[in-house]
């Protein structure tokens, strides 16, 4: 049939129903034309389906899906999986996974409500009132109530418990307002208090009959029941009865949504070498704080900054020459901070010249020459015979003391080399941690102390820098005294306005940088080795390594494609 014949046939059928017309047309075609027709129709249909598939791939969204597991290795075994008693990194890891507080931490490191639906602050800044979510429940299905919160705080404040968090809650009065409402009243405004509300809440019905002195020995200290994103399913021990690993599963009723990863296992190792080997042979998939050299295939490294500041804190009472700001400036200028980052931290850190992390120290092109010039411009002369800097009867020498742990001893050695490179004899003394604390820090028995400060998310610098904290048990180890700085620190404690706090913080930093009461060195970063196909891991600023789990419920390994209108905000 030619094209003209086919056209005429179609014209004759124009008044018939469409399906009838189609049948008539098909019947009028020869066998060969019918075959060709169906081939073309099939190709058009396949093309349409392919185009629809392509369109769908462009329109649909890939979203996290529930499924998968993660096996992580950590150094050290668990002892106290309890928010009141947790001491080790492993304890804190498991507490972070299994317990929830009234407040939590989001991916940006900001404090946000968790078990609490919302909170209110009184006009005088002394009373915090929290409203607990209606859907907040513990792993055993019991609801989280104000009584559980009040019970947790009362036990923390019990001296028989000996909680390491007791200092955060001294003098705080707790009041149950109703089933879901609880308030905390402070003796005076204290802006950093809100971070204390991240404390994991204990279920009263589990712990109320356990005497305080028996808390460390309860079965629930090992097999906890909390309201966190994961619940314990099993605990494995070795032949000696020592805990070997924990197996956890996602908690369906977690207030921020069921975690995407179904199962998490934590395996315990005795030291870093054992952990590194376990990662290399694929026994575990993730680990933190390892130097990421030769990272096994299918793994990647993410990093997070610690809210910590390290430096050499100077005691001018023990070495009068340090009372000269010229000497302090020369010492600070000479320091090769980048060498500390590269050598000690394998590049995972930030060089600092400030009492707060976040701003890297400026690079000095020729630090040794600049430091020498500072001394010479201010009347100091280097004695070739005595190999010291002299000015009248004054001589520059310094003794540096620190803890005998690898990171600090290596850092101290670089500091010693930097000081001696400009001609300042430096004696380095190392102490066990306990001896350093009791015999050196508490009595302020040092000239220079290499030490680290752990800051909170709402930094409370008062204990580290206010003049009232110069003596033990205060932590002002630089014995810093500055009236203007004191005023700023007091206002920082009282104001809750973030913009005002930022302005005050900048003023305080300027005061310290001008006075140089300490020679700041660095802020470390945490390395976290994880599987390549583990997504959603965004580390906030870290107070401890366990903060890496603060948003574990948003991590995922599985995905699915859905139409945009089905995606939940």
Image: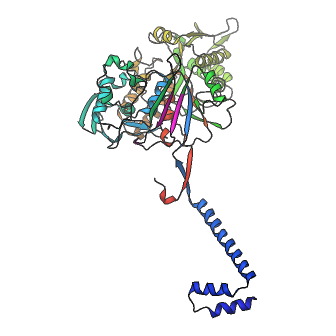
Residue 87 location in percent, x, y?
Answer: 45, 21
In the image, 131 versus 496, the foreground residue is 131
Q: Position of residue 331 (x, y in %)?
A: 60, 19
Q: Quadrant of the N terminus?
A: bottom right
* Residue drawn 70% across the image and 30% down it: 294
Q: Residues in magenta?
A: 239-266
| Nearest to the observer: residue 127 or residue 517 | 127
Question: Residue drawn at (49%, 17%), measured in percent from left and top?
Answer: 241
- The percent coordinates of residue 298 (x first, y second) are 66, 38
- Farthest left residue in view: 177
Q: Where on the picture, by quarter, is residue 367?
A: top right
The answer to whether residue 380 of the structure is visible from this angle is: yes
Is 241 magenta? The answer is yes
In the depicted structure, whether residue 270 falls above or below residue 547: above
Asked whether, in this view, residue 519 is left or right of residue 485, the answer is right
Image vertical order of residue 109 relative to residue 273, above or below = below
**Magenta region includes residue 285:** no
Count of marks overlaid on the render = 0
Is residue 436 rendered to the left or right of residue 148? right
Residue appearing at x 68%, y 88% in the figure: 28
Q: Name above or below for residue 318 compared with residue 461.
A: above
The colour mode here is rainbow
Residue 37's image quarter? bottom right
Say if 169 sits above or below 107 in the image: above
Q: Quick check: can you spot residue 124?
A: no
Q: Quadrant of residue 102?
A: top left
Task: Report the front residue among 469 and 214.
Answer: 214
Residue 123 x, y percent position in the rendering: 28, 39
Q: Nearer the viewer, residue 224 or 173?
A: 224
């Amino acid at each position: 049939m030619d094209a003209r014949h086919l056209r005429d046939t179609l014209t004759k059928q124009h008044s018939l129903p469409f399906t009838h017309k189609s049948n008539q047309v098909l019947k009028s075609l020869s066998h060969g034309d019918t075959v060709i027709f169906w081939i073309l129709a099939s190709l058009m249909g396949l093309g349409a389906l392919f185009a629809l598939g392509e369109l769908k791939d462009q329109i649909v969204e890939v979203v996290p899906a529930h499924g998968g597991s993660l096996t992580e290795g950590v150094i050290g075994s668990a002892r106290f999986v309890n928010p009141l008693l947790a001491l080790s990194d492993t304890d804190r890891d498991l507490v972070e996974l299994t317990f929830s507080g009234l407040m939590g931490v989001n991916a940006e490191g900001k404090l946000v409500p968790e078990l609490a639906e919302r909170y209110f602050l009184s006009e005088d800044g002394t009373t915090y009132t929290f409203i607990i979510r209606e859907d907040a429940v513990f792993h055993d299905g019991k609801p989280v109530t104000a009584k559980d919160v009040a019970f947790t705080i009362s036990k923390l404040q019990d001296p028989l418990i000996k909680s390491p968090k007791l200092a955060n809650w001294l003098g705080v009065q707790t009041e149950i307002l109703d089933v879901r409402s609880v308030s905390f009243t402070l003796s005076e405004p204290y802006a950093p208090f809100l971070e204390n509300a991240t404390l994991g809440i204990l279920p009263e019905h589990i712990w109320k009959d356990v005497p305080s002195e028996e808390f460390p020995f309860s079965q629930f200290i090992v097999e906890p029941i909390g309201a966190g994103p994961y619940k314990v399913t099993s605990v494995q021990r070795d032949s000696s009865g020592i805990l070997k690993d924990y197996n956890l599963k996602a908690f369906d009723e977690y207030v921020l949504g069921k975690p995407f990863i179904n199962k998490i296992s934590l395996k315990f190792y005795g030291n870093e070498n054992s952990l590194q080997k376990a990662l290399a042979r694929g026994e575990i998939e993730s680990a933190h704080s390892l130097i990421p050299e030769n990272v096994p295939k299918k793994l990647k490294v993410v990093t997070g900054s610690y809210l910590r500041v390290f430096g050499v804190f100077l005691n001018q009472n023990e070495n009068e020459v340090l009372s000269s700001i010229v000497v302090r400036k020369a010492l600070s200028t000479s320091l090769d901070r980048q060498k500390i980052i590269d050598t000690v931290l394998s590049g995972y850190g930030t060089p600092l010249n400030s009492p707060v992390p976040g701003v890297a120290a400026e690079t000095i092109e020729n630090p040794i020459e600049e430091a020498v010039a500072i001394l010479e411009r201010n009347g100091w002369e280097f004695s070739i015979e005595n190999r010291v800097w002299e000015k009248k009867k004054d001589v520059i020498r310094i003794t540096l003391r620190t803890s005998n742990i690898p990171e600090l001893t290596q850092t101290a050695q670089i500091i010693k080399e930097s000081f001696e490179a400009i001609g300042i004899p430096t004696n380095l003394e190392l102490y066990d941690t306990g001896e350093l604390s009791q015999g050196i820090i508490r009595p302020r028995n040092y000239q220079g102390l290499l030490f680290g400060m752990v800051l909170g998310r709402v930094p409370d610098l008062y204990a580290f820098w206010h003049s009232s904290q110069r003596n033990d048990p205060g932590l002002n180890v630089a014995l810093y005294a500055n009236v203007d700085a004191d005023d700023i620190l007091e206002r920082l404690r009282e104001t809750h306005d973030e913009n005002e706090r930022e302005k005050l913080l900048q003023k305080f930093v300027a005061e310290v940088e001008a006075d140089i009461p300490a020679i700041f060195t660095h802020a470390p970063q945490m390395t976290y080795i994880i599987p390549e196909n583990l997504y959603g891991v965004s580390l906030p600023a870290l107070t401890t390594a366990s903060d890496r789990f603060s948003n574990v419920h948003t991590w995922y390994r599985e995905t699915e494609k859905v139409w945009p209108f089905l995606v939940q905000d």
